[in-house]
Image: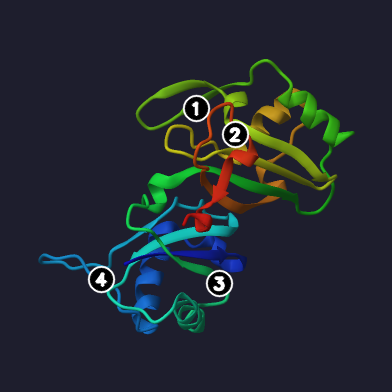
Amino acid sequence: MKIRIKFAKYGTMKYIGHLDMMRFFQKAIRRAQIDVKYSEGFSPHQIMSFAAPLGVGLESTGEYMDLEVLTMTSTQEIKQALNQVMVEGVEILSVIVLPDNAKNAMASVAAASYRLQRKESPYPVENLARKLRDFLAQDTIPYTKETKKSVVELDLKQHIYALEAESESAICMTVNASSSGNIKPAMVMEQFSRFTGIEIPAMSYQITKLETYAEAAGTSTPKGPHRFVPLDAIT
């Protein structure tokens, strides 16, 4: 059967990259004595997949991993067994059994929410909440996204589903995190900085992913935060 594991990553573990996290979980699953399913062939490996790689330096309370197991007693026992072998900075938050027809975690991702918390002082923008509303009220927010293979011109406005000031020191946003968009919080902040004319260095705030979402059944564009459900809410 397929199970979905939600976990948090914080503290010094935020500096551990995605590939090392995969190896960490492979070892942790063996230590927890979970009856995991292995692929067939000359190099068997645990059948697991992650929703989306988390950037180095980012913390998260909404990371997901799918795992295939041969047998299990309960999701609660798997959660407890894994937490007993976790290191400081990684915590298993929930474990659910997926329906047979569920898409894997990576294919399910539609959006993600983030908090950008200033490290030492409030944001240097007067009336931050109003400025964020004015920024999002623009007809378009053009952005040039460069990849290794191409340069893409896109309208960020179409990919920002929510943007608000939680306080003078914290900005929260929900953005497109699907393979077709994959908007990073730093991209939004880069354009917001240009809009205000005030430099906001990326190193001046800590990014925390709050949740990863799938598209809610029966919804259609235009999208809003209410049109998404957490990946562990799929039944």
Marking on residue 145: 1
Estimate how packed mark 2 is, as few (under 14), some (14 to 19) or many (20 or more) residues with alpha carbons within 10 Å.
Answer: some
Marking on residue 204: none
Measure how far apart labels 3 and 4 are at the Cα level. Answer: 22 Å
Query: Closer to us: mark 1 or mark 4?
Result: 4
Q: Number of numbered discs present? A: 4
Query: Closer to us: mark 3 or mark 4?
Result: 4
Which badge, 3 or 4, comes first in the chain's sequence?
A: 4
Measure how far apart labels 3 and 2 are at the Cα level. Answer: 28 Å
Which badge, 2 or 1, comes first in the chain's sequence?
A: 1
Measure how far apart labels 2 and 1 are at the Cα level. Answer: 9 Å
Marking on residue 37: 4
Which badge, 1 or 4, comes first in the chain's sequence?
A: 4
Q: Amino acid at mark 4?
A: Lys
Query: Closer to us: mark 4 or mark 2?
Result: 4
Estimate how packed mark 4 is, as few (under 14), some (14 to 19) or many (20 or more) residues with alpha carbons within 10 Å.
Answer: some
Q: Amino acid at mark 2?
A: Met
